[in-house]
Image (tube, helix red, strand yellow):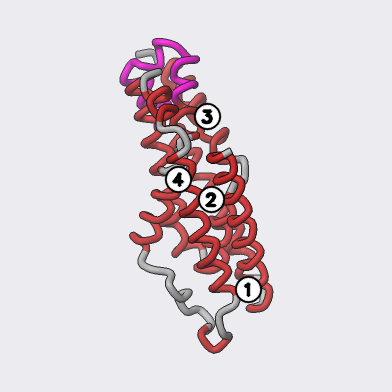
Amino acid sequence: MEPAALAAAFGAGILAGLGVVLPLGAVGVMLLHEGASRGWRRAVPAAAGVGTADLIFAVLALAAGSVLAPLVAQWGRWPAAVGGVLLLVVAALMVRTAFRPVAEESDGAEPAGAGSGWARYAMFFGLTAVNPFPLVYFGAIAVGLGEGLHRPPVATAFAIGVGIASLGWNLVLIGLGAVLRARSTARMRRIATAVGGAIVAVCAVVILVAAFV
């Protein structure tokens, strides 16, 4: 296998991964909040959960080619509906955190209800996994780039590029959130949490309306 072909596939994976994660949707807002509320180190599992889901989507799309995209399309509204409901629950928890009594907060303490790193990883992995868009997106790319992408070494390079792009951008988001945490007061963090929860709720409503209209 020529190194140039592997490098091209890796670069295509980077671009494809950025195409998924750069639009700042509900999960992106949640990653910002994760960094702001937990700090960079404790927010890394959330970023890894999103990156892992995107990597798996890329692998599935490459493995099945054009088969999986129509299959997911047959599921109709339900994946989007489930994702919308989960986002509403997360939005409610974020707003609840913003308005909990000040006595429950303490400097440097773990946020209430934060859970372990594995729990955060699983939650963000699940929120990303129930969104069918990345699978359809990567399936379309797999079809568009032709047969060469289905050769195992080339497909591996592409998938690795997707995973690195997704994880890298997610780490940037939690880093930005952590910077805000370091330079903000408790009141500012509470306001930011409430605003973030409201944004996530709006995204959830839009998803639910699109699913059922």
**Amino acid on which the number 4 mark rests in the picture:** Thr
Which of pointers 1 and 4 lies earlier in the amino acid sequence? 4
Find the residue positioned furthest to the bottom: 103
The residue at the point 46 percent across, 63 percent down is 41
Residue range corresponding to the magenta coloring: 139-159
Seen at 60% across and 69% down, the residue is 181
Question: Can you say which quadrant of the picture contains the N terminus?
Answer: top left
Number of numbered discs on residues: 4
Place residue 19 in its image quadrant: top right
Q: Which amino acid does label 1 sit on?
A: Arg
Q: What element carries label 3?
A: helix
Query: Which SS does the magenta portion mostly show?
Result: helix
Residue 102 vs 162, above or below: the answer is below
Other residues around mark 2 within 10 Å, as few (<14) / some (14–19) / many (≥20): many
- Between disc 3 and disc 1, the foreground one is 1
The alpha-carbon separation of the residues under discs 1 and 2 comes to: 19 Å
Residue located beneath label 2 in the image = 27
Judge whether residue 158 is colored magenta.
yes
State how far apart marks 3 and 1 are (Cα).
Answer: 35 Å
**Camera-side residue: 91 or 166?**
91
Q: Earlier in the sequence, mark 1 or mark 2?
A: 2
Work out whether residue 55 can be spotted. yes
Q: Do the residues labelled 4 and 2 touch (CB within 8 Å)?
A: yes
Give residue 130's position: percent from left, percent from top. Answer: 42, 43
Residue 188 location (% of width, % of height): 68, 73
Which residue in the structure is indicated by mark 3?
16
65 left or right of 211 in image = left
Q: Can you tell which mark lies on residue 190? A: 1
Q: Residue at x 59, y 73 (%)?
A: 98
